[in-house]
Image (tube, grey):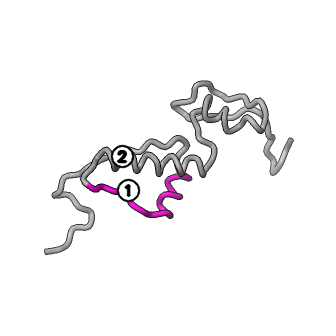
Amino acid sequence: MRALGLTAGRVTQGHRFEAAVSPVSLKDADSYAAQMENEGAVIASFEVRRADIVRQLHAAAAKVGGGVKPVADDALLDEVTGLVERPNVLVAASARSFSAFRRNA
């Protein structure tokens, strides 16, 4: 099938570094999400990726402890969800002396 000068097919690429096979040869449209996750290391569904990020954020905050909570910003969460194929939340810290929002004294 052709649309907008492009030819559709059953072959696609998964995650650049983590895919189990390259390329991924899709069996049919109904298999797309499962094959992309299992063979391509890509979570195709925006909603599933978003929920996975939220779950990982809460797990990371609980592990840090001390009342730490994830930033509650739906627009940021949606942006990050749209940017990643396979989310992996990382916890980082910086020196107290560093601040991008330091007040002038």
Q: Quarter-wise, where is residue 103 in the image?
A: bottom left
- The C terminus - image quarter: bottom left
Q: Position of residue 16 (x, y in %)?
A: 55, 34
Magenta stretch encompasses residue 49: no
Furthest-right residue in this view:
1
At numbered mark 1, what does the secondary structure look like: helix, strand or loop? loop
Q: Position of residue 65 (x, y in %)?
A: 27, 49
Q: Nearer the viewer, residue 44 or 7?
A: 44
Magenta stretch encompasses residue 76: yes
Left or right: 64 in relation to 58: left
Q: Which residues are magenta?
A: 67-83
Amino acid residing under circle 1: Pro
Amino acid residing under circle 2: Ala
Task: Check disc 1 and report the residue beneath it.
Answer: 70
Left or right: 5 in relation to 76: right
- The N terminus - image quarter: top right
Task: Check disc 2 and report the residue beneath it.
Answer: 60
Q: Nearer the viewer, residue 69 or 3?
A: 69
